[in-house]
Image (spheres, helix red, strand yellow):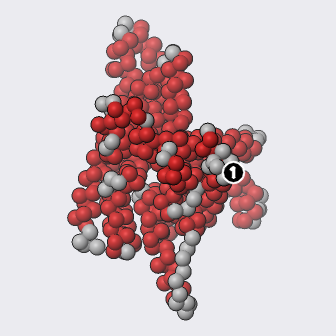
């Protein structure tokens, strides 16, 4: 149990990298698709609806496998510059995770956009504030604050989701844990160590979100 | 399209049975989850601090640790645990638990943690007046629970239970690592032997979408049923 600890700790770094990269890309995708979804263009609206429907309706494992195993089959892709990215399991995992969390994030942001009080926007307009400024200075801060609790949950789900990276040969925390379990045959001990590391990260995320919620609370 | 034909030449029938297997595992896991919820929800609502701690521990761990890790725990540890128990009863041979049981149990224990939270939330949002009214009417505790409180809990719980079902259904894809032949595993086998992963994983995605779509339709009907009178 003690000898496996350093290995698991270095694997934690891989997990953290995967989570932060996918969340970073995911938040951009989420914002983009939430804006498209609440926008006026019917085609883009439908596109973002089906994007989020498909990615939320299928398991992330399928998405990961399509990107990692499936795309490699297309001859055209293999000769293009995209192949540099797609041949790496690391980037495939990040692409799959980002697309997945992007779908969930877009739903979170969309519902936050829809709850904005119309009076606030009208007040901004009647004060003569330009539309772009209304978006950045009024809408976006409200949306971000409104979606903090739900986004916190999504971050934790994503942390758990990165464990799937171990199925495409990446040695993240779960991957290393599985490797140690199958060589030492001590499932309970390794589960406790790896599980505690995951819980610790969850705890940290939970508290950061709680702090932010308090800091940006509407009531003070 | 040739590859998806039913019969010997195609993978259509294999994928069909794999879909049934996914459904079977998901439903079993959901029911096991309800059993866990049945045990842990009362513990969570009770005023006893120790009991609260036990059920909070259960829901926190199961919702905070990746599903894959839980599956590995039961996959590698399950056989050893069962053999240990059997030894106490004097049986020394090797016992192998099949992949279905391991899978359904590990997904079930996770889904139970989510269900516990849902039922707790539903119980807590029932108005105190309902409890007092049934007391004033002189209803026995079990009658008041099953005839007054529980139906109202269902109304509040079903929309969230629908979410738990979605999570559980998608989690079953992870059981493929134990070798149980459900949609994901069957696609993996088919993709391996035909060298056409793009097709088979896309088919898998479509099958999952199909399952989520139709189960949502059914569950929404159920939701309407339990909302009658509101």
Q: Nearer the viewer, residue B135 or B122?
A: B122
Q: Is residue B82 visible?
A: yes
**Percent position (x, y) of residue A109?**
44, 31
Q: Residue at x 48, y 47 (%)?
A: B195
| Neighbours of disc 1 within 10 Å: few (<14), some (14-19), many (20+) | few
Residue B203 relative to residue A124: left or right: right
Q: Is residue B153 visible?
A: no
Residue A179 lies in what quarter of the image?
Answer: bottom left
Q: Secondary structure at mark 1?
A: loop
Residue B123 lies in what quarter of the image?
Answer: bottom right
Residue B141 in the image: above or below residue B182: below
Residue A202 in the image: above or below residue A100: below
Tell me how many marks there are.
1
Q: Residue at x 27, y 57 (%)?
A: A11
Of all chains, the one bearing label 1 is B
| Residue ID for mark 1 | B7
Q: Residue at x 36, y 35 (%)?
A: A78
Q: Quadrant of the N terminus of chain B?
A: top right
Q: Nearer the viewer, residue B77 or B151?
A: B77
Q: Nearer the viewer, residue B12 or A144?
A: B12
Q: Nearer the viewer, residue B182 or B61?
A: B182
Q: Quadrant of the C terminus of chain B?
A: top right
**Percent position (x, y) of residue A152?**
39, 43
Residue extending furthest toward the bottom: B90
Q: Residue at x 55, y 62 (%)?
A: B180
**Percent position (x, y) of residue B44?**
53, 62
Residue A12 relative to residue B93: left or right: left
**Percent position (x, y) of residue B70?**
45, 63
Residue B109 in the image: above or below residue B11: below
């Amino acid at each position: 149990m003690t000898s496996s600890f350093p290995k698991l700790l270095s694997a934690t770094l891989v997990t953290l990298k995967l989570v932060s990269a996918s969340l970073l890309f995911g938040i951009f995708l989420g914002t983009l698709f939430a804006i498209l979804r609440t926008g006026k263009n019917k085609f883009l609206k439908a596109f973002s609806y089906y994007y989020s429907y498909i990615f939320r309706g299928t398991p992330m494992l399928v998405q990961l496998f399509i990107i990692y195993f499936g795309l490699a089959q297309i001859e055209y892709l293999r000769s293009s510059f995209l192949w540099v990215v797609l041949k790496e399991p690391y980037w495939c995992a990040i692409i799959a995770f980002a697309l997945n969390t992007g779908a969930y994030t877009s739903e979170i942001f969309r519902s936050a956009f829809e709850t904005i009080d119309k009076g606030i926007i009208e007040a901004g307009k009647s004060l003569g504030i330009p539309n772009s400024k209304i978006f950045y200075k009024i809408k976006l801060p409200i949306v971000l604050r409104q979606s903090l609790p739900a986004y916190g949950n999504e971050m934790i789900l994503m942390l758990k989701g990165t464990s799937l990276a171990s199925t495409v040969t990446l040695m993240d925390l779960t991957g290393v844990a599985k490797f140690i379990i199958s060589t030492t045959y001590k499932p309970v001990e390794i589960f406790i160590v790896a599980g505690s590391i995951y819980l610790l990260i969850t705890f940290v995320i939970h508290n950061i979100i709680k702090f932010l919620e308090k800091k940006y609370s509407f009531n003070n | 399209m040739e590859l998806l034909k039913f019969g010997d030449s195609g993978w259509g029938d294999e994928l069909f049975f794999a879909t049934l297997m996914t459904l079977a595992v998901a439903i079993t896991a959901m029911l096991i989850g309800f059993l866990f919820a049945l045990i842990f929800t009362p513990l969570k609502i009770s005023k006893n601090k120790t009991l609260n701690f036990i059920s909070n521990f259960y829901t926190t761990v199961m919702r905070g640790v990746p599903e894959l890790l839980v599956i590995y725990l039961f996959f590698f540890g399950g056989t050893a645990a069962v053999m240990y128990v059997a030894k106490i009863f004097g049986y020394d041979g090797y016992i192998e638990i099949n992949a279905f049981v391991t899978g359904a149990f590990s997904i079930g224990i996770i889904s139970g943690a989510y269900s516990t939270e849902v039922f707790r939330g539903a119980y807590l949002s029932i108005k105190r007046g309902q409890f007092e009214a049934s007391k004033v009417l002189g209803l026995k505790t079990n009658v008041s629970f099953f005839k007054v409180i529980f139906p109202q809990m269902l109304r509040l719980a079903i929309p969230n239970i629908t979410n738990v079902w979605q999570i559980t259904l998608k989690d079953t894809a992870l059981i493929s690592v134990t070798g149980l032949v459900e949609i994901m595993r069957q696609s993996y086998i088919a993709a391996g032997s035909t060298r056409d992963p793009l097709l088979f994983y896309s088919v898998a995605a479509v099958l999952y979408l199909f399952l989520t779509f139709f189960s949502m339709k059914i569950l929404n009907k159920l939701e309407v049923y339990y909302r009658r009178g509101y």
